[in-house]
Amino acid sequence: MTLEAIRYSRGSLQILDQLLLPQQSHYEAVGSVRQAWEAIRAMKVRGAPAIALVGCLSLAVELQTGAGGPGLAALVAFVRDKLSFLVTARPTAVNMARAARDLADAAAREAEREGATEEAVRERYRDLELCEHWEEWPRGGTVLGKPWSIHTRPYNQGARLTAFELVYEQIPATLIADSMVAAAMAHRGVSAVIVGADRVVANGDTANKVGTYQLAIVAKHHGIPFYVAAPTSSCDLRLETGKEIIIEERQSQELTDVNGVRIAAPGIGVWNPAFDVTPHDLITGGIITELGVFAPEELRAALTTTISSRDGTQMDPR
């Protein structure tokens, strides 16, 4: 049976608790923005597109109950504040921040329409969330899949590569667990290294889970192509370089404690960044998106040209 990462119907949101996999397949109800924030922060939900979708849908659930207001101005402020709060759960991933800006702006525009009502604003938010996000979410999970994603908006397409995509893009690769990469590159003849990304900025610098930078260095040392796989929704052309990316820092107890029991010696301080930044010059293979594979220095122009040509509009770099 195929597991659904997210289950949603109007007024009801459930997430598959990824912390319990693979031993348990447990769905947790999310009935508020606060619950969504806590689930995202605890990493029960993972992956930049999934984070954005769960966050935005949680607000849709709250709005369905009549939350926000009274009055149009108060409702718009409520929507904007709740979305801004959701961004703080995992600030490095760009998808949630972009969705928050778009949906908050849409709510504000709806409130300014002649004859606007609170219910119209609520409906506009829910309609946008369903049309732009949920309907494009593949029910079986997130894949960067050519067959289904190439003709849809790239808002919530994931960055999981399958063997199909590697063959389609003619990328030679030996698939291994990322924790084995360094040793395998030295001793087993890996043909390519491919990692995901939570944010790719204009010059091709990439933020991904901590340890990615080291793998990129090792790959370059051994002359092995290093690829980054990310949907265009994770490409943030507003930022010029990786120095501008906000890096999420998590609690020290994640490294010093196991199941609530401290295993580190007393007095030891811990810095626990969840991500690091891989400079673009270490991405020697290219950046894989649902629109094609681009060299880091080609990314900005390629995305702007390709998306503008496909949609007939200018790409919004947000």
Image (cartoon, rainbow, N blue to C red):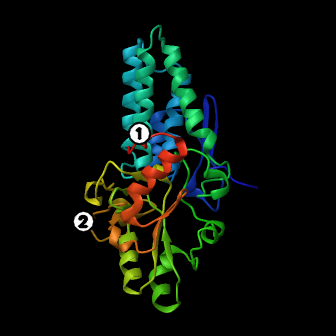
Residue bearing mark 2 = 269
Name the image quarter holding the C terminus: top left
Residue that appears at 61% across and 41% down: 14
SS for callout 2: loop
Q: Is residue 71 above or below residue 145?
A: above
Q: Nearer the N terminus, badge 1 or badge 2?
A: 1
Q: Which mark is residue 44?
A: none
Of 217 and 260, nearer the camera is 217
Quarter assignment of residue 241: bottom left
Quarter assignment of residue 226: bottom left
Q: Is residue 144 above or below residue 56?
A: below
Q: Specify whether 122 is left or right of 299.
A: right
Q: Which amino acid type is marked by label 2?
A: Gly
Q: Specify whether 5 is left or right of 105.
A: right
Residue 22 in sight from this viewpoint: yes
SS for callout 1: helix
Residue that appears at 36% across and 64% down: 297
Q: Horizontal and vertical percent for residue 284?
A: 41, 75
> Circle 2: is it few (<14), some (14-19), or many (20+) Cα within 10 Å?
few
Residue bearing mark 1 = 86
Q: Which amino acid type is marked by label 1?
A: Leu
Of 212 and 90, nearer the camera is 212
Q: Horizontal and vertical percent for residue 100?
A: 42, 36
Residue that appears at 47% across and 49% down: 233
| CA distance for labels 1 and 2 | 28 Å
> Circle 1: is it few (<14), some (14-19), or many (20+) Cα within 10 Å?
many
Of 131 and 248, nearer the camera is 131
Q: Horizontal and vertical percent for residue 159?
A: 53, 58
Q: Is residue 210 above or below residue 237?
A: below
Label 1 vs label 2, nearer the camera: 1
